[in-house]
Amino acid sequence: MKIIRFMFLLWLLTAISPSFATIFYSKNEAMELAFGKGAQVEQLSLFPDENETAKIQQDAKVKLDSGLFTFYVGKDQGTILGYAAIETSTVRTKPETLMIVLTPDGELRKVYTLAFHEPPEYQPPERWFEQLYKRPLAEMDFNKGVDGISGATLSTRSAINSIRKVMAIYQVMVKNKDQD
């Protein structure tokens, strides 16, 4: 009888515990948000060498956790519409997944939250991301005019780090290669 009560209590606790996991968009929906309906989307897989990794980490002010990076390139009749990267990072103890969209010139155009598994009050709102649009990489910093959000410090810091990383990879591995 004790085991039945224990199992019931365990079930009750897991059934009523808050679940914060929210997935907002699938990958296909995200690509449509980034580039529009009907755009051709190609994957661009990048493998930075030691020098490129060092430069990216210096510019982004974050450590790269992988030797592979993927950009999604949106095209319309051969014309590049922009670049998108899907970045997942741990905020406090749970992940957030952002899609960071750059213009063809590498400016930050839009950030979409694809999934957020922390409590909703920690999620940066769209209006917070708006202050970052068209801001150069060198100014993508709380010490350079980016306002934080009280109560969402970790998630905004995580978002800034992801954005800086994507912009730095673009500058080192895509923009510079296009000029060669």
Image (tube, grey):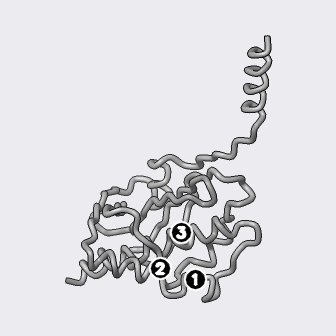
Q: Mark 1 or mark 2, which has the lower sequence index?
A: 2
Q: Are marks 2 and 3 in contact (CB under 8 Å)?
A: no
53 sits left or right of 152 in the view = left
> Residue at 46% of width from left, 49% of height from top?
27
Q: Are marks 1 and 2 in contact (CB under 8 Å)?
A: yes
Q: Would you place residue 83 above or below residue 107 in this image? A: above
Q: What is the distance, in whole Å, between disc 3 and disc 1 at their CAs?
A: 17 Å
Q: Work out whether residue 32 or residue 83 is closer to the camera in this orientation and state it.
A: 83
Residue 111 placed where, x, y %? Answer: 55, 66
Disc 2 crowd, CA 10 A, few/some/many (<14, 14-19, 20+): some
Front position in the image: 23 or 91: 91
Q: Which disc number belongs to residue 61?
A: 2
| For residue 1, side relative to residue 169 (left or right) | right
Q: Which residue is mark 3?
A: 110
Residue 42: x %, y % from top left: 31, 57
Q: Element under label 1?
A: loop
Q: Amino acid at mark 2?
A: Lys
Residue under numbered circle 1 = 141
Nearest-to-viewer mark from 1 and 2: 2
